[in-house]
Amino acid sequence: MRKFEGDQLVIATHNEGKLREISALLEPFGVKVTSAGALGLEEPEETEDTFVGNARIKAHFAAKASGLPALSDDSGIMVDGLNGAPGVYTADWAETRNGRDFPMAMEKTWALLEQKNIPQPRLAKFCATLCLAWPDGHDEVFEGSVNGHLTWPMRGDLGFGYDPIFIPDGYDITFGEMDPDKKHEISHRADAFTKLVRGAFA
């Protein structure tokens, strides 16, 4: 396991919600964080059908382009009643000509569950894969998840993506209603980050 020994890290994302969440998780380590978006890097085409594959594409692209270690996150929601969809295509389900529309994606997801008469609780899990890549081509991969179920209608505006319809196990509020600090403690990304810190920062 290679350790991260620098003080600068590129977050391979153009997603402001992900950047805020990852920056908050890294803050205790005194790492100076910038994003691929802030550096003006392009978004590479995500051609893999797994979270690990797409995380690697993003991290290696940013590391090579910036000359700095880069951390990527590929994440999404897997819905049991939809055979694991949208999964790696979570963001694609929200794509429109005018950018990503997650309320539309959540409506589509719920409508499909209704069409299939999937019984309650409608189980789902958020998955996150972090890839830490260096400019020399080395990488380390860390995976996390959080189980829960979906609810309707949407509730809360504190999160992003599918947060307003996802209730994690053991709670009665959605990620969209949850204080961000609390979400950072229990989320799929936090699970992956715990493994990242233990492996690369400890």
Image (spheres, rainbow, N blue to C red):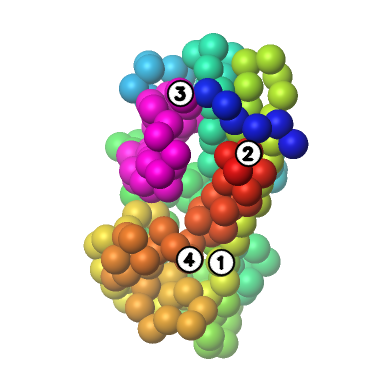
Badge 4 vs badge 3, beta-carbon distance below 8 Å: no
Q: Which of marks 1 and 4 is in front?
A: 4
Please state, as top left, top right, bottom left or bottom right, where the C terminus lies in the image: top right
Query: Which residue, given by chain and number where applicable, does mark 4 sit on?
Result: 186
Which residue is at the front of the view, 46 or 109?
A: 46
Mark number displayed over residue 8: 3
Residue kind at label 2, given as amino acid type:
Ala
User: Which residue is depicted at the point 48% across and 50% down?
Assistant: 93
Q: Which of marks 4 and 2 is in front?
A: 2
Q: What is the residue that sits farthest to the bottom in this orientation?
A: 120
3D distance between C-alphas at marks 1 and 3: 29 Å
3D distance between C-alphas at marks 1 and 4: 7 Å
Q: What is the residue that sits farthest to the front in this orientation?
A: 202
Mark number displayed over residue 200: 2
Residue kind at label 4, given as amino acid type:
Ile
- Up-down: is 154 above or below 103? below
